[in-house]
């Protein structure tokens, strides 16, 4: 029982959403239909000539680079076209993807003159012969200056803004990043064969996918290749169809070199993407074991506790004295015989951090929880990697199916999943990968919180224009600034590692800190960037942003102290990470066969500690005096509440604030500078204590609710009358968390967006203007545009000036939570969106002032039951 428990908001009252301006700005004025007609005359005439002939389909398909039925057709528009997907579907045109592009390559004078700021959008479709005929008829009417037929206005808008019309080709199937990775693997493979993934278009037409697979199998066999495995996931809302293919290296080279060769594998019509094989890994720290050996377990784990968490990783040592009774292994993929006990390091470390925390500074068993381990990786002396004869997405999907699906799910009460696995060479480059989409789909379908590590970057960084002597002579703050500048300059090469871009998940980065003192002083030449309480981001921690410039990582956690060594490199200095048993978090380990402890570092560690924090917060929610005392919360509600509290508790550490102030001093817009900081820190460093109890000079309240499109709930938070007439500093944080339905077809992939707004206008209780909220506060840290792009919305407010409010004894703060369709038409009005809300009101410390107790008395807690 805590002295300052989190309180429960009264259930929200149903209301209508307050509407604002449209998310779709008016398109720029086009130059005219005559110009567009001339620009696309050759392509349109070719289709028209073929259609008028006796064998139209055969004629069109004779050109492998031409537009043809049953071949993916790409429309590239200079700006997004509102309701295009709906209009295309109404014509019978299957739309596979709507992708907002970063730039428009080859924009001609026409586009440059009419558009000042391009927001190009690619629409990938699959026309039938009938659809091509309908498209041709629409184009002729458009060219003849006719008005758009009813329901066809989006087509007229598209034709006005059309930048390109072409088939989906080799450059689309083989992205620039995939090419680079394949070339690197070709160099390492020598004369051996190489494994690739062929991913087909996610059509709901299973017969069409069968035909595509058959064609691919024939062409692969003709290249001397073989099919290692395949995977088909055909679920409502998620389709994935792929093959794992092994090809001779010369066949891969021909494919990369022969982009326009009609016989190239990259020309297969049914292929959406060709990827290097997805090799998932969770590499352990390779430092030596601790010399001190074993510490006594601080209390035993309850082997009767419910399974609340799932560990997707390699195999942990379940019988380790630090883990015994807390881990259940479900080896559904038969990987245990392939993982020797002495190599089971990473999963053991993750289980240790979840169940015990840092075993030398904490060690207490996590309350009322055990975890189930479903191994996805094989542990070897080089680390843990996924099996090379399976598609990794297949392994992940089956794991979730067994955990939550069927008549006898393995973990029906688990609400949080630890996913500290990254896919080698798959850095986020703007397009959400299939694995991330799979996690998003499962999070929403099963109502589970999936925690994903941001990934680690082990490559060196370079400080330009200095020497090792000069760099080592700098003080710690100067070294930190130099390293931060390097990380900022190289942020696009150190982006999130798949599937950390998943939107319904929480992505966790790491700060450069330990929870215990170093084992011994650093050796000469080792660079220490860690300062107590500073919270600098770990050099190895990968950076965001996420899809659609969403905040990623969402939060950061303690990931162990990363030290560096300095080496000369021409006119620069090269900084490399040091593996050491001196620093890091203390975790259970096999220690090469001897059960004991070791130090571990990385975003995986921060992620595991975040999972532990979620489990502790869940226990506090239903404990005595908790906001849901005695209630049996559903899995989804626990997932949402803990997701909400993880972000709600977070704040920028000193290092993040210093980075922002430095950016401000260098110029640039404050919003851009905030976004630059969020790339590394997200919403900030989470605080497990603030997840489980109220702040020392404030109160935290939580609630749950359900909304549909264009609905709102108004939550009434009691305001403490003791604040009336008192001039003091105060702050407030409001956080929402939800799992959004997703639609991979749409550029606005996340369908549901939630936000909290003032429920009764923008007047404060003392009658003055407040600029959008109450108590005369202004947004702090991230601004309104940055917090609205993901599936967590968190607004932090501080008082603009110290004021003396006039608050009546029965005053309330009405908070309107509202839901809108963020996709431009994809969210069904019948879709229920469950959400969690957390609100904290905090003041400076004043003797005799206890707003927590005031609010608690007005709420008359505890209240049992869930809305």
Image (tube, rainbow, N blue to C red):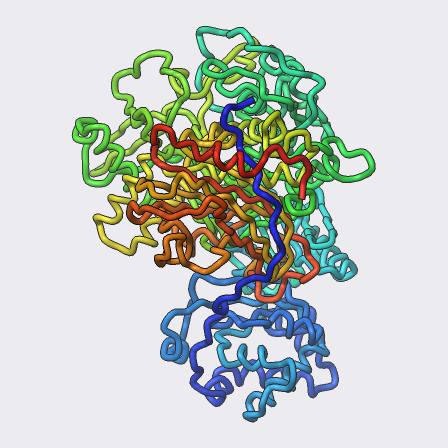
Residue at image position (61%, 25%) is 624
Residue nearer the viewer, 55 or 560: 560
Residue nearer the viewer, 364 or 797: 797
Q: Quadrant of residue 204?
A: bottom right
Counting the numbered discs, the total is: 0
Find residue 368 and report its horizontal and vertical position in percent: 64, 22
Give the side of residue 712 with respect to residue 767, left or right.
right
Residue at image position (73%, 58%) is 209
From this viewpoint, is residue 865 visible?
Answer: yes
Please tell me whether residue 700 is drawn above or below residue 847 in the rendered image.
below
Residue at image position (72%, 78%) is 130
Find residue 298 and report its horizontal and vertical position in percent: 55, 10
Which quadrant: the C terminus? top right
Which quadrant: the N terminus? top right
Find residue 503 and report its horizontal and vertical position in percent: 55, 48
Residue nearer the viewer, 513 or 845: 845
Please tell me whether residue 533 is drawn above or below residue 175 in the rendered image.
above
Give the side of residue 15 with respect to residue 568, left or right.
right
Find residue 174 and report its horizontal and vertical position in percent: 54, 55
Please tell me whether residue 37 is drawn above or below residue 560 in the rendered image.
below
From this viewpoint, is residue 460 visible?
Answer: no
Residue nearer the viewer, 733 or 484: 733
Q: Residue furthest front?
A: 809
């Amino acid at each position: 029982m805590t002295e300052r428990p989190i309180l429960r908001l009264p259930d929200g009252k149903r209301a209508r959403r307050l509407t604002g301006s449209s998310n779709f700005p008016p398109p720029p004025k086009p130059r005219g239909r005559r110009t567009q007609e001339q620009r696309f005359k050759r392509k349109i005439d070719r289709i028209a000539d073929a259609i008028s002939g006796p064998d139209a389909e055969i004629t069109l398909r004779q050109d492998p680079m031409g537009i043809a039925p049953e071949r993916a057709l790409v429309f590239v528009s200079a700006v997004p076209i509102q309701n295009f997907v709906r209009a295309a579907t109404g014509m019978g045109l299957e739309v596979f993807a709507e992708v907002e592009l970063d730039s428009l390559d080859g924009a001609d004078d026409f586009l440059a003159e009419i558009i000042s700021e391009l927001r190009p959008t690619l629409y990938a479709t699959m026309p039938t012969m009938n659809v091509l005929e309908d498209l041709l008829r629409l184009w002729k009417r458009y060219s003849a200056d006719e008005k758009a037929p009813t329901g066809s206005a989006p087509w007229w808008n598209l034709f006005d803004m059309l930048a390109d019309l072409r088939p989906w080709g080799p450059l689309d199937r083989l992205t620039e990043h995939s090419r680079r990775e394949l070339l690197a693997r070709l160099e390492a493979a020598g004369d051996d064969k190489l494994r690739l993934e062929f991913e087909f278009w996610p059509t709901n037409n299973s017969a069409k996918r069968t035909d595509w697979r058959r064609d691919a199998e024939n062409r692969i066999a003709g290249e001397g290749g073989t099919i290692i495995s395949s995977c088909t996931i055909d679920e409502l809302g998620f389709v994935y169809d792929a093959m794992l293919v092994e090809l001779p290296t010369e066949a891969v080279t021909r494919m990369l070199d022969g982009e326009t060769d009609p016989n190239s594998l990259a020309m297969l019509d049914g292929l959406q993407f060709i990827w290097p094989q997805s090799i998932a890994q969770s590499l352990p720290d390779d430092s030596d074991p601790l010399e001190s050996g074993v510490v006594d377990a601080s209390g035993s784990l309850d082997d009767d506790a419910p399974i609340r968490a799932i560990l997707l990783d390699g195999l942990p040592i379940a019988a380790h004295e630090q883990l015994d009774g807390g881990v259940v292994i479900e080896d559904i993929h038969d990987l245990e015989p392939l993982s020797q006990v002495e190599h089971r390091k990473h999963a053991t470390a993750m289980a240790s951090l979840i169940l015990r925390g840092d075993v030398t500074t904490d060690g207490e068993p996590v309350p009322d929880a055990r975890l189930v381990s479903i191994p996805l990786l094989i542990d070897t002396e080089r680390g843990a990697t996924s099996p090379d004869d399976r598609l990794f997405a297949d392994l992940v999907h089956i794991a979730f199916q067994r955990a939550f699906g069927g008549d006898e799910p393995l973990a029906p009460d688990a609400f949080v999943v630890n996913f500290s696995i990254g896919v080698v060479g798959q850095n986020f480059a703007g397009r959400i990968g299939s694995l991330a989409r799979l996690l998003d789909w499962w999070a929403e379908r099963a109502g589970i919180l999936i925690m994903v590590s941001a990934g680690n970057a082990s490559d060196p960084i370079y400080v330009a224009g200095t020497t090792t002597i000069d760099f080592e002579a700098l003080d710690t703050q100067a070294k930190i600034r130099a390293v931060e500048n390097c990380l900022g300059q190289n942020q696009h090469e150190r982006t999130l590692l798949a599937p950390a871009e998943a939107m319904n998940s929480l992505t966790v980065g790491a700060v450069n800190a330990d929870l215990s003192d170093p084992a011994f002083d650093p050796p000469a030449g080792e660079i220490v960037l860690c300062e107590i309480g500073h919270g600098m981001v770990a050099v190895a921690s990968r950076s965001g942003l996420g899809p659609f410039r969403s905040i990623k990582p969402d939060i950061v956690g303690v990931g162990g102290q990363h030290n560096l060594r300095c080496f000369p490199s021409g006119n620069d200095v090269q900084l490399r990470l040091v593996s050491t048993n001196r620093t890091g978090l203390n975790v259970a380990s096999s220690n090469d066969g001897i059960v004991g402890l070791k130090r571990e570092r990385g975003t995986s560690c921060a992620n595991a500690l975040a999972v532990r924090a979620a489990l502790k917060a869940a226990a506090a929610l239903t404990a005595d005096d908790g906001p849901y005392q005695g209630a049996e919360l559903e899995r989804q509600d626990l997932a949402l509440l803990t997701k909400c509290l993880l972000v709600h508790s977070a704040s920028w550490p000193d290092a993040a604030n210093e980075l922002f102030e430095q950016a401000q001093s260098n110029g640039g817009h404050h919003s851009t500078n905030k976004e630059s900081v969020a790339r590394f820190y997200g919403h900030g460093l989470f605080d497990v204590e603030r997840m489980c109890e109220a702040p020392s000079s404030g109160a935290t309240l939580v609630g749950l609710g359900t909304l549909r499109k264009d609905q709102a709930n108004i939550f009434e938070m009691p305001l403490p009358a003791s604040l009336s007439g008192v001039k003091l500093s105060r702050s407030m944080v409001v956080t929402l968390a939800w799992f959004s339905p997703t639609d991979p077809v749409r550029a606005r992939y996340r369908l549901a967006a939630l936000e909290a707004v003032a429920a009764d206008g923008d007047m404060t209780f003392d009658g003055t203007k407040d600029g959008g909220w109450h108590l005369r506060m202004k947004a702090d840290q991230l601004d309104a545009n940055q917090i609205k792009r993901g599936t967590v919305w968190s607004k932090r407010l501080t008082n603009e000036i110290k004021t003396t409010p006039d608050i009546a004894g029965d005053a309330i703060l009405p908070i309107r939570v509202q839901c809108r369709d963020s996709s431009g038409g994809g969210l069904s009005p019948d879709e229920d969106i469950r959400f969690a809300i957390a609100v904290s009101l905090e003041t400076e410390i004043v003797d005799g002032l206890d707003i927590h107790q005031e609010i608690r008395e007005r709420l008359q807690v505890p209240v049992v039951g869930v809305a």
